[in-house]
Amino acid sequence: MHRYSGYQASLELRKIYAALSDPDAAKGGDIRIIDESGDDLYGNDRFVPLEVPERVEASILRTVR
């Protein structure tokens, strides 16, 4: 079974998603992601942090707001 099974409507493979700061979620091993349905919690093992230049980050954030 694919590790993204059950999330087909909310997640797209290889897509860059913005994460929201959520210390309570982080304590439980989760991360709050802005997905196709708004924002939701996922296990942080489903994502890889990506550092991008500020200009690129600003552009990405404009597309998710």
Image (cartoon, rainbow, N blue to C red):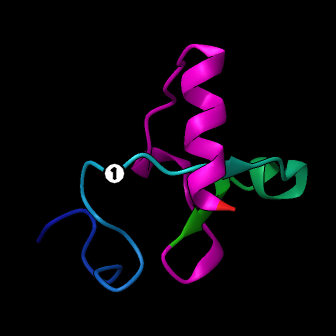
Residue 58 belongs to the span the image colors magenta = yes
Question: Where is residue 54 shown, x and y percent of the image?
Answer: 66, 17
Residue at mark 1: 15
42 sits left or right of 46 in the view? right
Q: The residue tagged with tag 1: helix, strand or loop?
A: loop
Q: Characterize the local packing of mark 1: few (<14), some (14-19) or many (20 or more) Cα atoms within 10 angstroms.
A: few
In the picture, the quarter occupied by the C terminus is bottom right
Residue 54 located left or right of residue 26: left
In this rendered view, identify the residue nearer to me: 30 or 20: 20
Q: From this viewpoint, which residue is outermost toward the top?
A: 53
What quarter of the picture does the N terminus occupy?
A: bottom left
Q: In this view, does 13 lie to the left or right of 33?
A: left
List the single residue furthest toward the right: 23
Q: Position of residue 47 (x, y in %)?
A: 44, 44
Q: Is residue 47 above or below residue 48?
A: below
Residue at 57% x, 13% y is 53
Residue that lies at the very extreme toward the left in this rendered image:
1
Residue at (37%, 70%) from the top-left corner?
Answer: 11
Q: Position of residue 35 (x, y in %)?
A: 52, 69
Query: Where are the magenta residues, as a range?
Result: 36-64
Q: Which amino acid does label 1 sit on?
A: Lys
Q: In this view, does 64 lie above or below 61?
A: below
Is 60 situated left or right of 22 in this image? left
Q: State yes or no: residue 47 in magenta.
A: yes
